[in-house]
Image: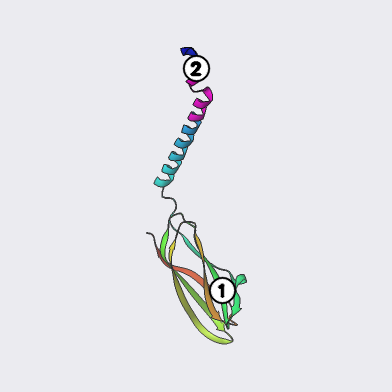
Amino acid sequence: MTATARQKEESPARLSFIAAGVSGALVLALVTYLTWHALQPGPPAAITADIVPTEGWNGNDLLYVPIDVRNVGSRPASEVVIEMLLQGSVAGDMTGERTGETTIGFLAGGESQRIYVALPEGTDVGPLIARVGSFQEP
């Protein structure tokens, strides 16, 4: 075998150069994308609390009503305090405002968590209000 034939056999083919170029471009694009999103803070944390009365259930003489808590921002939130307020009548008695609250330790950006409020059976959930009391941005 001559030196020219051996060199032609051992040199990379044109397809190898094309594959290396495409791979390099993809790696560069990925690094650029990750760097861009790491440096852009995005929208701040924004917490919502939505009552889902249609998915409530009764058990042990209590009415359990779910509340969906969402962080619609992209930054995390910690120590999220949700306050539940009930105004109106409970099982026929006229009562004043009843309050309760719970704390969610951490919600990442875009994350949601379901919490429940337990009320006496026969409670009208129409006047039930869930609101965000406070939260911190770590």
Residue 51: x and y in percent read 55, 69
Q: Please, which residue is most extreme toward the right here?
A: 54
In the rendered view, how is the structure colored?
Answer: rainbow
Residue at horizontal 45 percent and vertical 74 percent from the top = 101
Magenta stretch encompasses residue 35: no
**Residue at the spot x=46%, y=72% of the render?**
83
Give the residue at x 49% y 35%.
26
Assign the C terminus to one quadrant of the image.
bottom left
Mark 2 residue element: helix
Q: Residue furthest front?
A: 1
**Does 137 appear above or below 16?**
below
User: Label 2 is placed on what type of residue?
Assistant: Lys
Q: Earlier in the sequence, mark 2 or mark 1?
A: 2
Viewer-nearest of labels 2 and 1?
Answer: 2
Q: Which residue is mark 1?
A: 65
**In the image, is residue 17 part of the stretch drawn in magenta?**
yes
Q: Determine crowd level at label 2: few under 14, some 14-19, many 20+ residues with C-alpha closer than 10 A.
A: few
The quadrant in which residue 102 appears is bottom left
Part of the protein shown in magenta: 8-20
Residue 8 is labelled as: 2
Q: Give whichever of 61, 21 is nearer the camera.
A: 21
Label 2 – label 1 distance at C-alpha:
76 Å
